[in-house]
Amino acid sequence: MKTIGILGGMSAASTQTHYRELCNMTPLQVAGEWEKAGVILNQEAKALERGGADFIVLSTNTMHKLADQMMQVVSIPLLHTADVTAAPIKQQGLHSPGLMATAFTMEQSFYTDRLAATGLVPMIPNASDTTLVHCDAALTMALG
């Protein structure tokens, strides 16, 4: 049996500590302080490894921007969401999945490049829809 280290949670009630930390990282995103957020994620990844996790799951698409920094000096693997998502999409014979996420994830290449590396061509909403989806994501996180 494998032990999974998960950074994040499905609700505030189930993982209040990690959820609160992820919410605290939101201002770091808005301020463009990615380095600080990466330091926090790296500390948490190391803690999961020390705690006996066999691999890590990062349950937030946007913070995959910091996956490399997060995994520095961590010997257990990160099960990258883009890779895990790409596999069943391709198995179904599909090639152009829609991507709805924060503007960071939709507009920057850290996630779409990972999908493209698997042969997929992600479809991104137009600029006005990207703004709307991003605002909805931010509101959902704020309301918790």
Image (cartoon, rainbow, N blue to C red):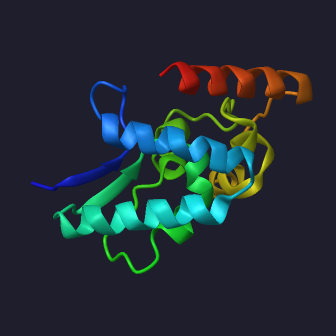
Q: Is residue 141 visible?
A: yes
x, y (%) of residue 26? Answer: 61, 42
Quarter of the image that includes the N terminus? bottom left
Q: Nearer the viewer, residue 142 or 52?
A: 142
Q: Nearer the viewer, residue 68 or 40?
A: 40
x, y (%) of residue 12? Answer: 36, 27
x, y (%) of residue 86? Answer: 54, 44
x, y (%) of residue 51? Answer: 18, 63
- The quadrant holding residue 64 is bottom right
Q: Residue at x 49, y 47 (%)?
A: 81
In the depicted structure, whether residue 84 falls above or below residue 102: below
- On the rendered structure, is 142 left or right of 99? left
Residue extending farthest to the right is 127
Q: Residue at x 47, y 22 (%)?
A: 144
In the depicted structure, whether residue 103 falls above or below residue 70: above
In the depicted structure, whether residue 119 falls above or below residue 18: below
- The quadrant holding residue 53 is bottom left
Q: Residue at x 47, y 38 (%)?
A: 88
